[in-house]
Amino acid sequence: MSKLLKDSNHMCFACSPKNPIGLKLVFEHEGDICRASFIAGPEHQGWNGVMHGGLLTTILDEVMAQWLWSRELSAMTAEMTTRFVNPVPIGAKLTIESRLVANKRRLFLMEADALLPDGSVAAKATAKFMPVKV
Ligand SMILES: CCCCCCCCCCCCCCCC(=O)SCCNC(=O)CCNC(=O)[C@H](O)C(C)(C)COP(=O)(O)OP(=O)(O)OC[C@H]1O[C@@H](n2cnc3c(N)ncnc32)[C@H](O)[C@@H]1OP(=O)(O)O
């Protein structure tokens, strides 16, 4: 296991249980999917009544990163695109799922979807991750 994964003092904004202002995301793995859920509160708004798109991007990024880290593939986001398909209402439970699309030379190509409670897509992301030594 990598040093970072063993470090109980890590303060990742998205996943650390110790970060007082963090999102405290928890992940589950099913086959080739990494999954998390999140309910945006009023403090997570951008547009009135709607979850902030930057925060949604953060969560999509994190779920893709955790797909890799959980397999002990130490990699950082090198590039990312988010398509915001539908607004996320405050209080709606989002399900975020990520998967590996391809591993080309040093690049891990990842994708992730954020799904609304009725299964419709709120946002879709693609990203390139590159290996780093930790
Ligand atoms: C107790 C419980 C603990 C739990 C504990 C959990 C811990 C689990 C923490 C997870 C946490 C996740 C958090 C979210 C994920 C972040 O937020 S990561 C943070 C945001 N990302 C960054 O800060 C990355 C910043 N960038 C970099 O550090 C460097 O640019 C990189 C990405 C490492 C690449 O650097 P490099 O290896 O020096 O690469 P470089 O020499 O520039 O390029 C090498 C080759 O790759 C190519 N390349 C570089 N970038 C790209 C690109 N974007 N696209 C295509 N090609 C590219 C170059 O063209 C070059 O090609 P060649 O010339 O070799 O053909």
Image: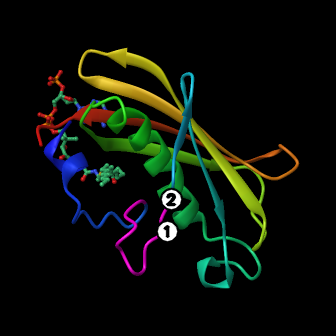
> Extreme right residue here?
118
Q: Quadrant of residue 66?
A: top left
Q: Residue at x 39, y 42 (%)?
A: 65
Question: Does 113 sit above or below residue 30?
Answer: below
The front one of 2 and 123 is 2
- The chief SS type of the magenta part is loop
Left of 83 or right of it: where is 66? left
Q: What's the magenta region?
A: 15-24
Q: Are marks 1 and 2 in contact (CB under 8 Å)?
A: yes
Residue 22 horizontal/vertical position (percent): 43, 72
Q: CA distance from mark 1 to mark 2?
A: 6 Å
Q: What amino acid is at disc 1?
A: Leu
Q: Residue at x 55, y 41 (%)?
A: 28
Residue 22 located within the stretch drawn in magenta:
yes
The residue under label 1 is 23
Q: Quadrant of ligand 1?
A: top left
Residue 60 located within the stretch drawn in magenta:
no
Quarter of the image that includes the C terminus = top left
Question: Does 98 sit above or below residue 10?
Answer: above
Give the total of numbered labels: 2
The residue under label 2 is 25
